Image (spheres, grey):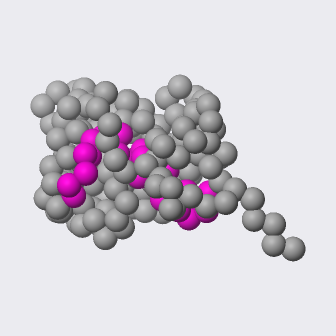
Amino acid sequence: MEHVDPIRDISKINEIKKILKEQSSRDYLLFVLGINTGLKITEMLNLNVSNIQNEDGSIKTFLKTTNNRSEVFINRKVKAAILTYLSKTALKQNDYLFKSSKTNQPITRQQAYRIINNAAKTVGIEEKIGTNSLRKTFGYHAYKKGVAVSILQRFFNHSTPSETKQYLGVKQEEIKPEIDVNL
């Protein structure tokens, strides 16, 4: 697997959202879900509508990952993207959330890559961007907002904090002290 980078610039993230929203509510949801939950692309592509929507049509607050190792919070931006997408489709509870327009299967990893990579190129991102960039973007911005590296390390199933920082593309000058006792 080739190394890809997180999307560090929030203005570029917003430009990508705008492009994808105009292009397709499915593609927009793919991006928003990825950068807000940190799910792996395989976990996202394997989601069924029933994984994120209750029987009454409301959106679940927590999403169980496909391997049931954890629950992921569904924030208001993701909920809004889900509701918009589902209102524009005729998906049933057992349908794949990211169903291909050509088959009853989910879109492929390659198609997801094309969607993300093309949008990144369109907004002028020069770093290497791929499907794993969504997961890295989630972690990078969580770290920048003060989430402890130990929590991210556990989430990403890494052995060491330095492995997590390297994975997230955190540069030396961005590393915060782990302990800040301010009594």
Residue 145 magenta-highlighted? yes
Q: Considering the image in quadrants, where does the N terminus appear?
A: top left
Q: Examine the image and state in which quarter residue 39 appears.
A: top left
Placement of the C terminus among the 4 image quadrants: bottom right
Residue at 34% in and 56% down: 7
Image location (x, y in percent) of residue 69? 60, 30
Q: Position of residue 131 (x, y in %)?
A: 30, 40
- How many numbered discs, if any? 0
In the rendered view, would you say 57 is above or below 76? above
Can the viewer see residue 89? Answer: no
Please tell me which residue lies in front, 179 or 123. Answer: 179
Q: Quadrant of residue 70?
A: top right
Give the residue displayed 62% in from the left and 49% down from the top: 149
Q: Is residue 40 left or right of residue 155?
A: left
Regarding residue 167, the answer to whether it shows in the image is: yes
Write down the region rendered in magenta: 125-147
Answer with left or right where residue 151 lies relative to residue 107: right
